[in-house]
Image: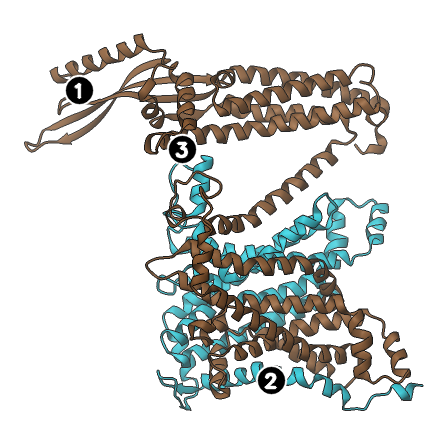
Amino acid sequence: MHSMLERRKWEPYLWLLPSILLMTIFVIFPIFIVFKLSFSEISKAGVVGDFIGLGNFKAAVTDKAFGTVMTNTLLWVVSVVGISTFLGFIVAMVMNSPFRGRKIARSIIVFPWATSLVIQASIWNYIINFEYGNLNNVLLNLGVIKDAVNWRASYQIEFMWECGVGIFVTIPFVAFCVLAGLQSIDNTYYEAATVDGAGYWKKLTKVTLPLVRPALTVSTVLNIIYVFNSFPIIYTITKGAPANKTDTLVTYLYMLAFYDQQKGPATALSVIGFVLLCIVAGLYMMISMRKEEL
Amino acid sequence: MTMKSMTPAHIRKRNSWALYGAAVALAAILVLFSLPIYHFATDLYVKKSPNTFVGDEKYVKTRADVEAIAETYQNQKELGNVTVLEDVTQRVNSKGETTSLITFRVSATVDKNAWDFIASGLPNGRLLLFCVLALGASVLLLLLSLPGTFALIPQKLSRRNMAMRNAACALMLIALVLVPVFHFYTVSVFQRQMIDALTREPTPRLTSLLAATDALLYGGQAGDTAGALVAGLTYQTTAAFWLLLPSMFGLLVAFILLSRESLSHTLTRGLLYLFVIALCVVILYPYYVMLITAFRNNAETTDMYFTNIFPTKWIWSNITDIVNRGVPRFLLNSLLLSGGATLIALGCGIPAAYAMARMNFRGKKVFLGFVIMSQMFAPIVLLVGISQLMNVLNLNDSIIGLMLINAAFNQAFAIWLLRGTFISISPEMEQAARIDGCSTGKALIHVLLPMAAPGIVTTLIFVFINAWNEYTISTVLISTPFKKPITVGITQFSSFNMIEWQYLFASALLATIPVVILFMFIEKHLVAGLTSGGVKG
């Protein structure tokens, strides 16, 4: 019987072929091109010249905006991923407990996930406008403030808004990943803990947290990647202005490549970003995997 | 104290304390209602003195004039306390002498308590009246439900008494909510609607509002100048008002104790609902802004002092305007792009996921690593490489190019979700089909795919939405206006010097509604997909 079901050795690869082809052409090739370009001289018109070693990297790193951009990227990733994971976890805990209207609430919570980031960012751009923004309008109408507040008074505050929008759109993803983890927890664990006399906090830290850790790991790793690569929020709200003070790596390299026509340094930044991302995501995965084994 | 340890004696004791508490809270509320809850001050008359010194002849004369005017106000009108205030501004004149400019203000201050508001006929007075009625009704219901049952365990109460106590709790909650609503509404009435009364065409509603305010603050004698007086009003909420909230909350807690077994359970539930409601409000807020802005006219979108919750007039022509400016074409492009990307992603992803779920082969882990690594790169980081590649393939500025890229970058998630779905389905049916002589392909199409339909639809919608919402690659690769997808197309309404918000948001609305509805469909399956696909591994 078994021999009838045995497949030819090359068959699995045939099944994988379309997918591999698609990804090789449109993901791997561009990666190679970017790596190659980062070591080549590129003219303003885009003509690829000779191998110049680390020239592009040197140009990118010594640019005076580089320090600000890297600090911003770090702030952006840490604050958005950290805060949205924390809040998303709370949202998931609430959504996992039974209450009336839970289905509706869950449908509403996916809204930010389903909306294009450009649209979401455009709306917030309008909301926080000083002269006619809806936030001032609503707060004035409610009598919370007496005069219009300038919500974009400085670039630091603008950057905080961008992080806020980033958190806002990231929460649903975390919440749903954690929710998936929570729903796979067998109720008997909680019953056993109740029998042992564990209170709410004990159950949370000794039962829930260890059991949703795989889900949290997956959502955090994916979020680090998504948030690091997130472009439309910052591009729509400030475009990195003033003078790259609110740029993250991806918006900076976009401006560099397509506005300033400096494709060489831009590709060098791509490579730096990729290496950083690999290191961070790899480290995080290794650490959380190890914890799981212990 | 847990529920089990509560004996009837405990409950009797607790309930008697709750009743004492309720009586105290009720007395406090009545007292607080009679204390002034708002403090108003208005300038009735302002006069600036000529350059002078405090205490000299000109000063004395002006002061006397102003005091005479103050006296007429004091005599003629019931304006509470009329006082004369002076602000001194020092100046140095051309000769180098310091002189003072003195501003005299005849100011009236008046304190109003809750009963004044109720009697005023102002809309916010009616709110307080409702509050008092709800409070009274809830106390009455509670009293009716008390006799003979006071000492009993709440669960043993008769149905009728239980219902009365529950209704008392609900009414008390309404009364509690009405107090902050009253505060915000009062502020809104005085701060904004009175300014409107001065600056806009007076409507009958505003005129009657003004008359009622005049009656409350100036005894109805300010007449035509009432609007100006109210517009210059400053006001403070007194401590008595803020003490009302905890007192009413105390009363509510006492009521809950009398009708329910466990207070902490009730409060936790309340907090839970509060959290969920607040969350939903925050999440829906940008969508509300998008909706109302899409249907306002241009002037209203840039008016900070706009007081209505919805557009004054729903401008449906915004939609016809954007239809004439190419939006249907953008939507069609998005549909083609996302549809094509979805087909390609699933066409390549289903066989791959099938192989990953059902077959064992060398290099399976390598492929999995490859898939995960492709997640690492978002198109934005590779844009330079992608645009070069597209030049080589002659797919620059083409929707087909966009389709392929979107499909490729969604492969990882598609394979992940599909693999999870396939694993969760037992392979027995396919094996049976293959023993009956089906080829692997036929077994997949006729047996597995129908069973995996929910997971496949979820993946399909997920990829579709990702492609629909994609912005970055499209903005770089597409330069011909009529080939732009909607996410890029909407940016035509915002330029550096002017943003046509109503058109921007009308198109954004059209782009958002379909995907949000689609996403709501798969929301339930997405959790299942995430569970079986990745999280459990």
Chain in brown colour: B
Q: Amino acid at mark 3?
A: Arg
Given the image, what chain letter belongs to the residue carrying mark 3? B
Judged by depth in the image, the label closer to the viewer, 3 or 2, is: 3
Cα separation between marks 3 and 2:
62 Å
Disc ID at residue A24: 2
Q: Position of residue B178 (x, y in %)?
A: 57, 28
Find numbered disc 1 in the image and state the secondary structure of the residue it sits on: loop
Cα separation between marks 2 and 1:
88 Å
Marks 3 and 1 share the same chain: yes
User: Quick check: B349 left or right of B93?
Assistant: right
Chain in cyan colour: A
Q: Residue furthest right?
A: A1
- Which residue was labeled with disc 3? B192
Residue B62 visible in this rendered orientation of the protein: yes
Callout 1 environment at 10 Å: few (<14), some (14 to 19), or many (20+)?
some
As rendered, which of B342 and A70 lies closer to the eye? B342
Q: Residue furthest left?
A: B95
Marks 2 and 1 share the same chain: no
Find numbered disc 3 in the image and state the secondary structure of the residue it sits on: helix
Q: Amino acid at mark 2?
A: Thr
Residue B153 visible in this rendered orientation of the protein: no
Given the image, what chain letter belongs to the residue carrying mark 2? A
Residue in the image at 54% along x and 79% along y: B400
- Which residue was labeled with disc 1? B54
As rendered, which of B191 and B321 lies closer to the eye? B321
Against A258, residue A48 (above or below) is below
Callout 2 environment at 10 Å: few (<14), some (14 to 19), or many (20+)?
some
Disc ID at residue A149: none
User: Quick check: B460 left or right of B298?
Assistant: right
Which comes before the other along the chain, label 3 or label 1? 1
